[in-house]
Image: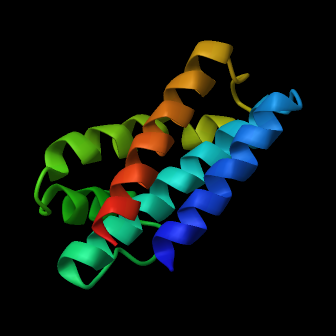
Amino acid sequence: MYAREAREVLEGAKSASELGHARLAALGGVNACVRASDAICVAERGEYAQGEDHGQALSLLEQVPGGSALATKLRLALGYKSDWSYGVTAVSGPELVKVLRAAEALVVEAERRS
Protein backbone atom coordinates (compact mmCIF):
# COMPACT_ATOMS: atom_id res chain seq x y z
CA MET A 1 0.00 0.00 0.00
CA TYR A 2 2.70 2.52 0.99
CA ALA A 3 4.87 1.73 -2.02
CA ARG A 4 1.88 2.06 -4.35
CA GLU A 5 1.07 5.49 -2.91
CA ALA A 6 4.70 6.55 -3.32
CA ARG A 7 4.56 5.46 -6.98
CA GLU A 8 1.34 7.41 -7.55
CA VAL A 9 2.82 10.57 -6.07
CA LEU A 10 5.99 10.17 -8.13
CA GLU A 11 4.02 9.68 -11.35
CA GLY A 12 2.06 12.83 -10.54
CA ALA A 13 5.32 14.71 -9.99
CA LYS A 14 6.64 13.52 -13.33
CA SER A 15 3.46 14.63 -15.07
CA ALA A 16 3.68 18.04 -13.43
CA SER A 17 7.28 18.33 -14.62
CA GLU A 18 6.30 17.46 -18.19
CA LEU A 19 3.63 20.17 -18.05
CA GLY A 20 6.15 22.75 -16.86
CA HIS A 21 4.93 23.01 -13.27
CA ALA A 22 8.36 22.86 -11.66
CA ARG A 23 7.39 23.72 -8.06
CA LEU A 24 4.52 21.21 -8.05
CA ALA A 25 6.80 18.56 -9.56
CA ALA A 26 9.54 19.29 -7.05
CA LEU A 27 7.26 19.10 -4.02
CA GLY A 28 5.71 15.93 -5.41
CA GLY A 29 9.19 14.46 -5.77
CA VAL A 30 9.99 15.30 -2.15
CA ASN A 31 6.69 13.79 -1.03
CA ALA A 32 7.38 10.64 -3.06
CA CYS A 33 10.75 10.31 -1.32
CA VAL A 34 9.12 10.57 2.09
CA ARG A 35 6.37 8.09 1.23
CA ALA A 36 8.85 5.64 -0.27
CA SER A 37 11.09 5.81 2.79
CA ASP A 38 8.03 5.15 4.95
CA ALA A 39 7.21 2.12 2.79
CA ILE A 40 10.75 0.80 3.14
CA CYS A 41 10.68 1.23 6.91
CA VAL A 42 7.30 -0.51 7.20
CA ALA A 43 8.55 -3.40 5.07
CA GLU A 44 11.78 -3.78 7.04
CA ARG A 45 10.90 -2.64 10.56
CA GLY A 46 7.11 -2.68 10.76
CA GLU A 47 7.07 1.03 11.60
CA TYR A 48 7.62 4.45 10.09
CA ALA A 49 8.27 7.91 11.44
CA GLN A 50 5.11 9.84 12.24
CA GLY A 51 4.85 13.57 12.54
CA GLU A 52 6.98 16.35 11.18
CA ASP A 53 10.35 15.21 12.55
CA HIS A 54 12.30 14.30 9.43
CA GLY A 55 15.29 13.46 11.60
CA GLN A 56 13.34 10.52 12.98
CA ALA A 57 12.49 9.37 9.44
CA LEU A 58 16.16 9.53 8.46
CA SER A 59 17.19 7.66 11.59
CA LEU A 60 14.72 4.84 10.97
CA LEU A 61 15.69 4.58 7.32
CA GLU A 62 19.38 4.38 8.22
CA GLN A 63 18.62 1.31 10.36
CA VAL A 64 17.35 -0.85 7.49
CA PRO A 65 19.72 -2.90 5.31
CA GLY A 66 21.33 -0.52 2.84
CA GLY A 67 19.76 2.35 4.71
CA SER A 68 22.70 4.71 4.66
CA ALA A 69 22.57 5.10 0.88
CA LEU A 70 18.78 5.36 0.96
CA ALA A 71 18.89 8.01 3.68
CA THR A 72 21.28 10.05 1.53
CA LYS A 73 18.59 10.22 -1.17
CA LEU A 74 15.91 11.22 1.33
CA ARG A 75 18.23 13.80 2.91
CA LEU A 76 18.85 15.36 -0.52
CA ALA A 77 15.11 15.79 -1.12
CA LEU A 78 14.38 17.08 2.38
CA GLY A 79 17.12 19.67 1.97
CA TYR A 80 14.96 21.47 -0.60
CA LYS A 81 11.57 20.99 1.05
CA SER A 82 11.22 24.16 3.14
CA ASP A 83 12.62 26.58 0.58
CA TRP A 84 10.47 25.12 -2.19
CA SER A 85 7.36 24.89 -0.01
CA TYR A 86 7.48 28.53 0.97
CA GLY A 87 8.76 29.86 -2.35
CA VAL A 88 12.04 31.06 -0.83
CA THR A 89 13.99 29.80 -3.81
CA ALA A 90 13.02 28.95 -7.36
CA VAL A 91 13.18 25.35 -8.47
CA SER A 92 16.02 24.89 -10.93
CA GLY A 93 16.00 22.22 -13.60
CA PRO A 94 19.07 20.41 -12.26
CA GLU A 95 17.67 20.37 -8.70
CA LEU A 96 14.35 19.01 -9.93
CA VAL A 97 16.12 16.26 -11.86
CA LYS A 98 18.12 15.30 -8.74
CA VAL A 99 15.01 15.06 -6.59
CA LEU A 100 13.01 13.10 -9.17
CA ARG A 101 15.92 10.68 -9.60
CA ALA A 102 16.17 10.24 -5.82
CA ALA A 103 12.43 9.66 -5.67
CA GLU A 104 12.55 7.09 -8.46
CA ALA A 105 15.34 5.19 -6.72
CA LEU A 106 13.52 5.19 -3.38
CA VAL A 107 10.20 4.17 -4.94
CA VAL A 108 11.83 1.31 -6.85
CA GLU A 109 13.44 0.14 -3.63
CA ALA A 110 10.14 0.44 -1.75
CA GLU A 111 8.42 -1.64 -4.44
CA ARG A 112 11.19 -4.23 -4.31
CA ARG A 113 10.91 -4.60 -0.53
CA SER A 114 7.12 -4.58 -0.33
- In the image: residue 15, left or right of residue 4: right
> Is residue 85 something that shows in the picture?
no
Question: Quarter-wise, where is residue 84 in the image?
Answer: top right
Eyeballing the image, is 63 above or below 25? below
The x, y position of residue 55, in whole percent, is: 31, 57
- In the image: residue 59, left or right of residue 83: left
Residue lying furthest bottom in this view?
46
* Residue closest to the eye, 5 or 22: 5
Q: Which residue is drawn at 28% across and 82% down?
A: 47
Residue lying furthest right in this view?
19
Q: Residue at x 20, y 60 (%)?
A: 59
Q: Which residue is drawn at 70% across and 24% down?
A: 91
Q: Quadrant of the C terminus?
A: bottom left
The x, y position of residue 112, in whole percent, is: 32, 61
The x, y position of residue 35, in whole percent, is: 49, 64
For the rendered model, the colour scheme is: rainbow
The x, y position of residue 7, in whole percent, is: 58, 58
Eyeballing the image, is 28 above or below 22? below
- In the image: residue 16, left or right of residue 13: right
Q: Which residue is drawn at 44% across and 37% down?
A: 102
Eyeballing the image, is 30 above or below 49? above
Question: Quarter-wise, where is residue 40 in the image?
Answer: bottom left
How many labels, in total? 0
* Residue closest to the eye, 97 or 59: 97
